[in-house]
Amino acid sequence: MKAIHVTDERTLELQETDTPILKDGEVLVRVRVAGVNRADLLQAAGHYPPPAGESEILGLECAGVIEDPGTTGRKAGEKVACLLAGGGYAEFVAVPEGQLMPIPEGYSFAEAAAVVEVATTVWSNIGMLTGLEAGQTILIHGGAGGIGTFAIQMAKHVGATVAVTAGSAEKLAACKALGADILINYREEDFAEILKNKCDRILDIMGAKYLPGNVKALATGGHQVTIGLQGGVKGELNIGLLLAKRGTISATALRSRDRADKARIVASTVENIWPLLEDGTITHQIHATLPLSDAQRAHDMLKAGEVTGKVVLLIDA
Amino acid sequence: MKAIHVTDERTLELQETDTPILKDGEVLVRVRVAGVNRADLLQAAGHYPPPAGESEILGLECAGVIEDPGTTGRKAGEKVACLLAGGGYAEFVAVPEGQLMPIPEGYSFAEAAAVVEVATTVWSNIGMLTGLEAGQTILIHGGAGGIGTFAIQMAKHVGATVAVTAGSAEKLAACKALGADILINYREEDFAEILKNKCDRILDIMGAKYLPGNVKALATGGHQVTIGLQGGVKGELNIGLLLAKRGTISATALRSRDRADKARIVASTVENIWPLLEDGTITHQIHATLPLSDAQRAHDMLKAGEVTGKVVLLIDA
């Protein structure tokens, strides 16, 4: 089969390679569309190796058609979206059955491939881990990004008050259009002062840099979950202040989870989020659709930082 | 009624004061025995004021008899143990109904008064918050203390592997006698190195000082809960390492919770822990029983640090 290979010069090239051999409980999926994630850029640069035993090929999400159901009870020809530990930038990928999702009704392969990572990430953290409820206030850092825009819509659907940070008036306007209630330009304002003791939940992508501010912003019983480390890894924690608030800080990742854990998250995401995609409660955006052979260009677009929405790769273009 | 008063010189004196006036949902309890806690020493020193609207009198736990059921459906004469926001060092105390517990079968008033704070603290943190399960490993810092000895027995009952830290061979031997599996003298050994990546749960009383070591000791999906700050309040958190482990850090306190929250904890503690007290699965120790008028001497004993087990105050001695 054809798949994207990372050359010694850290560039992406379409090459011929072996089709994956199925293990017990896996299906072979003919990939139609693969989603591109920032984590793929890290992996291509050599900084984010796949978990032990998983495909070395890039690609954490895709949509396609079951080619070989292996030992599972699935049917060849079934259309599926897939959460992957790797392997999406290819004509075929082996997928554990627990990581298969139906294509949301009315969705194209491209729309489905584009939503897998963001939906499972947002739901597993805000929904499953922190249990966001109506009437609570959630702070979403990076509100205008892919995770942020999805999280705003989910949180508004739950009935929460949504505060966001972003770096420009345009980005904040985009957040507002999706329902965000409190808009903070982090270049001009101090989010921790504005939201002091007010945030029941915080979805954080900054890590160390925002730790003191986030703890200040937490409300009594508040729960921060960090899913990105754009502001570094080592920071100061005032655990006395955290105790006074009876607060919790979690930090999570999706790719390193074992298959049982991923299956649990995938099932809960389909149950709770798929209906919201199908009825249009939560929308998301595709910025560009490129052929698989243009994977390098897709990465260059993300690096340039001017992408609003998802970039996806078409395998049968 | 008679109650302990903190003088301007920060000493404890038995004085005449007003009997509490009941609010809706409260019962008046004639106190027979009040437990002494380290937090009482802090409050006497002026560092730990009671929550707004609660009694200024010392005392976070007691056992006694209902004198006046107020607006509740309780009966006068009923024997009860009580979780208090304050007021235990007195002849009478007003107690919200949700903070009343039965006296464990076979328990004296003294034994009941001595177990309320430790039982609710250990169960609300290890049981309700972190959900300790059989097969998991829990690290209990200060294993030989009141919280530690109770936590060891509860964790062993659940079926966990128990690691403890303590500062002497004698203290570690006491932990071993209660079932602790891994004994670490923190004066001689590095707990974080010994338990690196092994701890599913950590019950911490040190706060800032142990934060780096605790994160190092956490296993994948591990959960640390800090309930004491003996090692300071500001420490370094490697949130990158926490993310790699998908770990969680909570910090909690009991006294500052609202009445609904306390009622929830009290009910769950009675349901889950009382049977273990009644059948002897969990034991605890009374070090000394003093008359209420000797409250100052009780505090001096705790300050001197030579107490093994609980000090309680007899009101009708």
Image (cartoon, coloured by chain):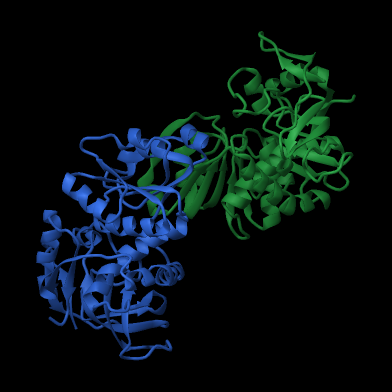
Chain colours: A green, B blue
Q: Quadrant of the C terminus of chain A?
A: top right
Question: In what quadrant of the picture does the N terminus of chain A appear?
Answer: top right
How many numbered marks have been drawn onto this rendered protein structure? 0
Name the residue at 69% across, 24% down: A305
Q: Which residue lies furthest to the top in this view?
A: A9
In the image, residue B121 sits, relative to residue B238, either above or below, namely: below
Q: Is residue B23 visible?
A: no
- The x and y percentages for residue A51 are 60, 29
Q: Whole-percent x and y of residue B173?
A: 21, 49
Say if A130 sits above or below A175 in the image. below
Of residue A271 and residue A160, the one placed in the foreground of this image is: A271
Q: Image check: A150 left or right of A254?
A: right
**Above or below for B150 versus A167:** below
Looking at the image, residue A6 sits to the left or right of residue B97; the answer is: right
Horizontal and vertical percent position of residue B307: 15, 58
Position of residue A120 measured from the top left corner of the image (x, y, whole percent):
68, 43
Q: Residue at x 29, y 72 (%)?
A: B55
The quadrant holding residue A93 is: top right
Front residue of A294/A157: it is A294
Residue A115 location, quadrant: top right
Is residue B68 placed above or below B35 in the rendered structure?
below
Q: Residue at x 42, y 82 (%)?
A: B25
Left or right placement of residue A152 versus residue B227 in this view: right
Residue A57 appearing in the image: yes
